[in-house]
């Protein structure tokens, strides 16, 4: 019985320390606050990277074959709008937020919080990655 209690306390402490390290790393790398809004006006981009600690990231863009989009937030939401003819491998992860992408099956972690998904659209010629700690992430096609 006491072994299980010590194990639980140890795991809880390890998770808290990992989260502190994640937040400190994010603060050093990402925009500290404020929203990010990008509209490429129909242009297909080769590369796009967004990141914020406490703001939302929204982008309405196209993606070239072989292109990459990466969007990260700590406590903000991510909303990516791309054309219906998207050709990319898309993945999303969130510790405590919701994930949504057309046709994607969101997996919940078996133990503890966390969700993720991987989906392929078209021939999968590009790559899109959405990561948020406590925000929601959504992929919208065709708008």
Image (cartoon, rainbow, N blue to C red):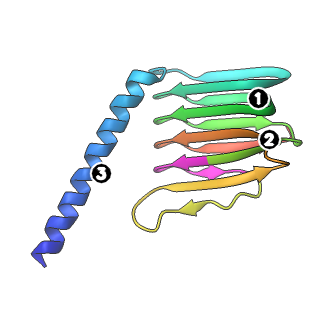
Q: Which stretch did the figure color magenta? A: 92-101
Q: Quadrant of the N terminus?
A: bottom left
Estimate the x, y position of residue 42 in percent, counting from the top left: 87, 24
Task: Count the numbered circles shown.
Answer: 3
Which one is nearer the viewer's eye here, 32 or 17?
A: 17
Please tell me the numbered disc located at residue 60: 1
- Crowding at mark 2 (Cα within 10 Å: few <14, some 14-19, many 20+): some
Residue beneath the point at 46% across and 28% down: 53
Q: Which mark is residue 125?
A: 2
Determine whether 66 is above or below 136 in the image.
above
Q: Quadrant of the C terminus?
A: top right
Instruction: Give the structural element (helix, strand or loop) at label 2.
Output: loop
Q: Picture coordinates of residue 4 (x, y %)?
A: 18, 73
Mark 1 or mark 3, earlier in chain: 3
Say whether residue 41 is left or right of residue 47: right
Q: Residue at x 30, y 51 (%)?
A: 15
Judging by the rendered image, the residue that carries numbered circle 3 is 15
Q: Is residue 83 magenta?
A: no
């Amino acid at each position: 019985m006491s072994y299980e209690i010590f194990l639980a306390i140890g795991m809880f402490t390890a998770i808290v320390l990992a989260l502190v390290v994640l937040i400190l790393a994010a603060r050093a790398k990402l925009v500290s606050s404020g929203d990010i809004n990008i509209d490429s006006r129909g242009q297909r981009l080769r590369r796009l990277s967004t990141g914020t600690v406490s703001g939302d990231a929204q982008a309405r863009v196209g993606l070239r074959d072989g292109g990459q989009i990466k969007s990260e937030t700590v406590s903000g939401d991510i909303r990516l709008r791309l054309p219906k003819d998207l050709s990319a491998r898309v993945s999303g992860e969130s510790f405590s937020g919701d994930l949504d992408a057309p046709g994607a099956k969101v997996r919940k972690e078996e133990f503890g919080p966390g969700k993720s998904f991987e989906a392929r659209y078209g021939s999968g010629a590009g790559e899109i990655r959405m990561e948020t700690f406590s925000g929601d992430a959504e992929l919208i096609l065709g708008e």
